[in-house]
Image (cartoon, rainbow, N blue to C red):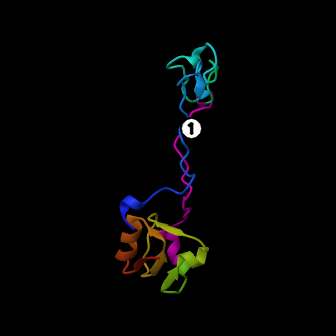
Amino acid sequence: MRLQDLKPKAHSKKRKRIVGRGDGSGRGTYATYGLKGAKARSGGTKQKGFEGGQTPLYRRLPKLRGFKPLSKVEFIEVNVEMLEKLAGDKEAINLNELFDGKVKVLGRGEIKKPISVKASKFSKTAREKIENAKGKAEVI
């Protein structure tokens, strides 16, 4: 098989309608444009969305502010001050399993106990506070 041997499937290409080539063609005289009027003349088309002078739909609707992403991820927020209470006497906690969802650790409060924390996200200050207390911040 060579490139010049390739052809489209039979009857898959529709022939363009040729108008205005004499009365014998069946599409002469007015060439399917009807009689007089804007649509019979050159440049006689309206832009998309034209509603005959009525205020078009895209101008009747209020403007939308921004957009809502379809793949938005909701995070459960936990502050550093809660980690010692949640851990109790354990040295490691998995917040995603504990809260049954994606958790982000935020940096409000203080931590004194070294705890290994596993979560989906950590803020910069939360990570620093956990590591300053000789703990570990692991992203799952």
Q: Is residue 10 left or right of residue 134?
A: right
- Camera sees residue 56: yes
- Camera sees residue 85: no
Q: Which of the image's four quarters has the N terminus?
A: bottom left
The location of residue 132, given as percent across then percent down, is 35, 75
The location of residue 35, given as percent across then percent down, is 63, 15
Queried whether the magenta region covers residue 69, the answer comes back as yes
Instruction: Between residue 64 and residue 136, name the one nearer to us.
Output: 64
Classify 119 as above or below 9.
below
Instruction: Between residue 9 and residue 65, name the one nearer to us.
Output: 9
> For the view shown, which residue lies furthest in the front direction?
24
Identify the residue at horizontal 57%, vertical 52% (top origin): 11
Q: Is residue 30 left or right of residue 121?
A: right
Name the element at disc 1. Answer: loop
Identify the residue at horizontal 51%, vertical 74% (top origin): 83
10 Å crowding of disc 1: few (<14), some (14-19), many (20+): few
Q: Which residue is mark 1?
A: 64
The location of residue 17, given as percent across then percent down, is 56, 34
> For the view shown, which residue lies furthest in the top direction?
36
Magenta range: 58-84
